[in-house]
Image (cartoon, rainbow, N blue to C red):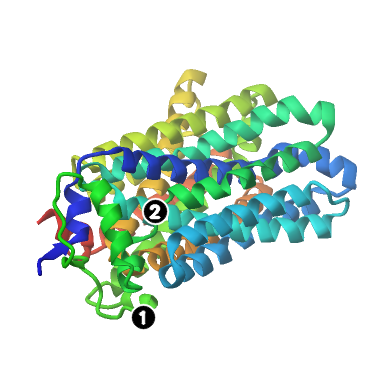
Amino acid sequence: MKQVDASRLADEASFTRFHGVVLFWCAMAIIFDGYDLAVAGIALPSIMKEMGVDATQAGFMVSSALFGMMFGNVAFGTVSDRVGRRGVIVVCIALFSVCTAAAGLTSDPVSFSALRFLAGLGMGGVMPNVIAQMSEYAPLRMRSTLITVMFSGYSVGGMLAAVTGKGLIESYGWQSVFIAAGTPVILLPLIWKQMPESMAFLLKTGRTAELQRILSRIAPQHVFNPDDEFVLSATPRQHDAPLRTLFAEGRGFSTLMFWATCFMSLFMVYALNSWLVKLMATAGYSLGSALTFVLVLNIGATVGAIGGGWLADRLHIKVVLVLMFVVASMSIALLGSQMPTWALYVLVGLAGACTIGTQTLSCAYCGQFYPAACRGTGLGLMLGVGRAGGILSPIVIGAVIGMSLPLAQNFLVIALPAVIAAVTISLVNHGRSTLAVAQR
């Protein structure tokens, strides 16, 4: 009998067609998720006009999905460690696709908000599971890059929502872009067939033959024997208590630091997404120019996510994160200063790269910090706690703007969380991570 370390085989593998399939479907799940998250904002003016709601009611209608995402992050991240990751991903895609499409058939704000909350559960549930999936299967030397490439699908989904909205809303009404969100349901059988199950779950449930077939695709050069015994390196002792494992073996303080970092990061992300147009309009820019800043913000986010992942695979991931948060604080703080428009575009691009892009990289780091058996739980709880920052952010920044402070002070308030995040992520004990174990 020979012992085979499945985690090490995955870590040391070359990129194969198998990895391409996992990356493709995880990225598609993120694109679907990004579309569903962005579509409410794209259609909001038409919804407000047709349903006769004011800005306060509209804000609650939009926030209902964010509340759902907070609960979905925690619930589905934890559930996947117990019942398997593939099924949870499929269920989550079905949930947010069907509920978003159904929201397009409503005619009152209460029904709309209820369905958006349910859609948010699915949107929040997909995120930790696809990160955990890529973290488990991606080769170590390019893991951060693949995770951040996958996560750039959020920007693609947002752009797709904008293009779809421009083409459909004027001709067919706001309902059309919501109904279009149901399209991914037809792909679910293919996702179920081609998406592999978590190695940790297969080992836990004794499905070793299926695990061996997957490993044969990951490392085709490896010769397996019928009596091989499969193990996972850094498997926690508490197999049935993934939540407890987050605080075991010296990981407790780092878990809290990941939560604090995600809270601050999502506070900045939603502050910029919610108020950048308004703040730039206050600075004297036309609506068209202000919307261009949002486009530059998302382009910067895509570049930052992929570029940050590339750097993290070559340098220390924690160092890259600290530096990116520092750049975020400086670029956002300077947005309130008088300077040429091209310079502001550069600063907004840097802000997007080092807020939205850095949030993506933080997820990649968290996904590599915990053992595979509790990875979904770790990511889900981090994102669930962090989502509270995203929910509070539009309210807090709105109150600050209502105080009629100088423009520069508004941006200083948005920049402050980046400084705090740089400190909290620097306090993570990297030596306790599975990434550090794999790199030894």
* Residue occupying the far front of the picture: 226
Nearer-the-camera pick, 162 or 126 = 126
Residue type for callout 2:
Pro
Question: Residue at left 68%, top 60%?
Answer: 117
Q: In the picture provided, is 39 more to the left or to the right than 377?
A: right
- 91 above or below 146? below
Question: Residue at left 36%, top 67%?
Answer: 201
Q: In the picture provided, is 338 more to the left or to the right than 67?
A: left
- Looking at the rendered image, the quarter that the N terminus falls into is bottom left
Position in image of residue 47 (x %, y %): 82, 43
Residue type for callout 1:
Asp
Position in image of residue 79 (x %, y %): 48, 70
The answer to which image quadrant residue 332 occupies is top left
**CB under 8 Å between callouts 2 and 1?**
no
Nearer-the-camera pick, 34 or 356 = 34
Q: What's the mark number on residue 318? A: none
Mark 1 highlights which residue?
Answer: 240
Position in image of residue 417 (x %, y %): 44, 53
The mark total stands at 2
Question: Residue at left 60%, top 32%?
Answer: 160
Mark 2 highlights which residue?
Answer: 196
Secondary structure, mark 2, is loop
